[in-house]
């Protein structure tokens, strides 16, 4: 019987030196944010049964918005140090008692499924193992004045990554012992394991599994990833709904007061529905009705942000990203202009984009046709999607 494997994904740091005005794990990168990419990797891996996120208390709302679509255990709050946060994640898993636990930093969003499989295999074999890479540069020791005091032997040096993998009971006990001994200065879990008397093995790391730390890291990643995503596609979507009795309509995920409501699929948000079709069109994966049939009662009155989140996740599942979303709304009323920025912000939030990558325009039909007679409302959308070369 294969071992039960859990993952603790640590996303409780502030990481503000990376710039962007938000913790680095919530900064947009190609394919989402660091926390989204890390959690998607573990929650979608066949060998991982449990994913335990650890977050900062100030990030509850941001985390909930970013991860609603993932298969996760309820997030627990981290502590003052990374070591405290890891221990909180391990304690949250204690009642489930997995056989193996992988401990990963959310700031390493480009770990691969193969790396996770190597980590699981190494832990099952040795009980404690970490991914490493050979050191290519010459490494010097220096004194407090910056003068060289020695040269280290490069052949025996390794750069260490995460996820680090352990038998759960052993690393949980080691963390408890370190806490009781007031040892809170370990820079990674392997160092703590060594202190606790565990023998730590190594396995092959992944050169793409970099840790995002500085603004330069984010710039380099964007350049490299966009170069890989050279298959640029454009999808088109449209949706129309009829006005009916009511006192509001939903547009772009925003509730807008209006003299009338609308009838239609779910909450009848023509903006989000057209966007879903545009994204699915770029992927050649059908339309909204294929995935969310209007005949299915479970979608009656459903919030359309779920449909957009699904379409966005389909892009990520194929290793791609959304580059731009453009929407035009056609109606005599309500006026879209006063709500434009709120709609852009909400769509950007659902799609994991910056608002600068979401455009919303509005026009009338000059009193012509059913929109001119105020019988209904229409939205047209285009989605620009970047996929890896060779996809489909």
Image: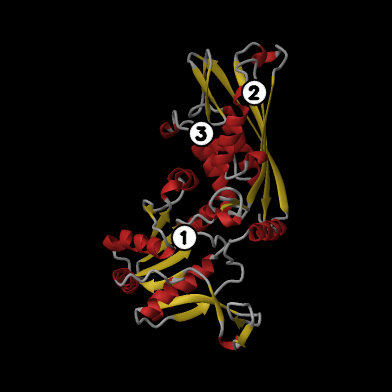
For the residues labelled 3 and 2, the Cα–Cα distance comes to 21 Å
Reply above or below: 227 against 176: above
Of 390 and 338, which appears nearest the observer? 338
In the rendering, which numbered label is found on residue 304? 3
Quadrant of the image occupied by residue 79: bottom left
- Secondary structure type for disc 2: helix
Of 8 and 315, which appears nearest the observer? 8
Q: Which residue is tagged 2? A: 337
Mark 2: few/some/many CA within 10 Å (<14, 14-19, 20+): few
Residue 334 percent location from the top left of the image = 60, 17
Give the residue at x 54% y 40%.
350
Q: Which residue is tagged 1? A: 42
Mark 1: few/some/many CA within 10 Å (<14, 14-19, 20+): many
Q: Earlier in the sequence, mark 3 or mark 2?
A: 3
In the rendering, which numbered label is found on residue 325? none
Give the residue at x 39% y 74%.
192
Regarding residue 124, the answer to whether it shows in the image is no
Residue 253 percent location from the top left of the image = 53, 31
The outermost residue toward the front is: 145
Reply above or below: 314 against 296: below
Give the residue at x 53% y 16%.
258
């Amino acid at each position: 019987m294969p071992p039960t494997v859990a993952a603790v994904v640590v996303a409780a740091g502030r990481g503000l030196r990376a710039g962007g005005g938000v913790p680095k794990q919530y900064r947009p990168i190609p394919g989402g944010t660091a926390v989204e990419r890390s959690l998607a990797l573990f929650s979608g891996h066949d060998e991982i049964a449990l994913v335990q996120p650890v977050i900062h208390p100030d990030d509850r709302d941001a985390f909930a918005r970013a991860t609603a679509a993932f298969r996760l255990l309820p997030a627990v709050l981290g502590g003052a140090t990374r070591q405290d946060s890891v221990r909180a994640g391990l304690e949250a898993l204690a009642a489930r008692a997995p056989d193996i636990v992988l401990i990963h930093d959310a700031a390493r969003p480009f770990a691969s499924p193969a790396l996770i499989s190597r980590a699981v295999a190494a832990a099952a074999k040795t009980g404690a193992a970490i991914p490493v890479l050979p050191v290519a540069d010459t490494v010097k020791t220096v004194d407090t004045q910056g003068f060289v005091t020695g040269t280290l032997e490069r052949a025996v040096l390794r750069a260490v990554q995460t996820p680090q993998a352990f038998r759960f009971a052993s690393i949980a006990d080691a963390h408890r012992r370190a806490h009781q001994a007031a040892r809170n200065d370990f820079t990674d879990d392997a160092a703590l394991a060594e202190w606790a008397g565990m023998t730590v093995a190594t396995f092959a790391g992944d050169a793409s599994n970099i840790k995002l730390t500085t603004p330069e890291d984010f710039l380099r990643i964007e350049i490299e990833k966009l170069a890989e995503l050279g298959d640029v596609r454009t999808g088109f979507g449209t949706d129309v709904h009829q006005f009916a009795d009511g006192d509001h309509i939903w547009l772009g995920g925003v509730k807008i007061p209006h003299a009338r409501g609308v009838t239609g699929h779910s909450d009848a948000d023509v903006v989000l529905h057209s966007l879903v079709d545009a994204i699915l069109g770029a992927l050649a994966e059908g339309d909204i009705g294929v995935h969310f049939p209007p005949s299915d009662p479970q979608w009656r009155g459903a919030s359309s942000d779920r449909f957009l989140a699904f379409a966005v996740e389909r892009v990520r599942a194929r290793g791609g990203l959304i580059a731009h979303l453009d929407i035009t709304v056609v109606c005599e009323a309500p006026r879209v202009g006063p709500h434009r920025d709120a709609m852009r912000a909400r769509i950007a939030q659902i799609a994991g984009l910056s608002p600068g990558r979401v455009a919303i325009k509005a026009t009338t039909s000059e009193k012509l046709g059913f929109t001119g007679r105020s019988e209904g409302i229409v939205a047209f959308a285009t989605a620009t999607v970047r996929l890896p070369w060779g996809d489909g």
